[in-house]
Amino acid sequence: MKFSISALKKAVAAAAMVSTMALMILFQTSSQAMVSSSEDGASIFKAKCAMCHAADGSASTTVGKSLKIRDLRSAEVQSQTDDQLFAIVASGKGKMPGFEKSLGADACKALIAHIRTLKQ
């Protein structure tokens, strides 16, 4: 059986995406109690978001590139209101899961505050 390079690349990207989504679901199922009050937006971002969005918010990860995730530093994202960003973080968007149920509203707000620091 012959595979083209293009088909192989697509299969590898799909496998990476499925693996990452499985990890995200696993991490998301942790209870709200696991997020201590001392944990700030940056540490939550590192634990829950950086695997796709990259530590700097650029979405330059393999998953970020394969899903065509927006750069959180961009004017397009940064121009959204806190309420708009909260709706996305809390409820999810596209393949991104929502985090309000697992992390709580305060942690979602801390994430938004951190996202605001990622300006280009």
Image (cartoon, rainbow, N blue to C red):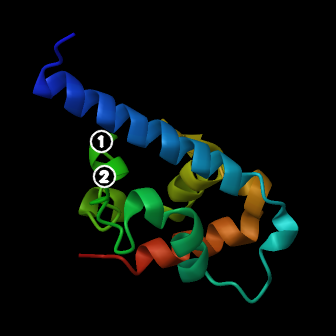
Res. 20 visible in picture: yes
Q: Residues within 10 Å of mark 1 (few under 14, many from 20)?
A: some
Residue 47 on image: x %, y % = 58, 70
Foreground residue among 48 and 62: 62
Q: Residue at x 77, y 52 (%)?
A: 29
As drawn, the residue found furthest toward the left would be 5
Q: Quadrant of residue 66?
A: top left
Residue at image mark 1 = 66
Q: Is residue 18 above or below residue 111?
A: above
Q: Which image quadrant: the N terminus?
A: top left
Foreground residue among 93 and 25: 25
Q: Quadrant of residue 13?
A: top left
Q: Residue at x 66, y 46 (%)?
A: 25
Q: Which image quadrant: the C terminus?
A: bottom left
Quick one: SS at disc 1?
helix
Amino acid tagged 2? Thr
**Residue 3 falls left or right of residue 88:** left
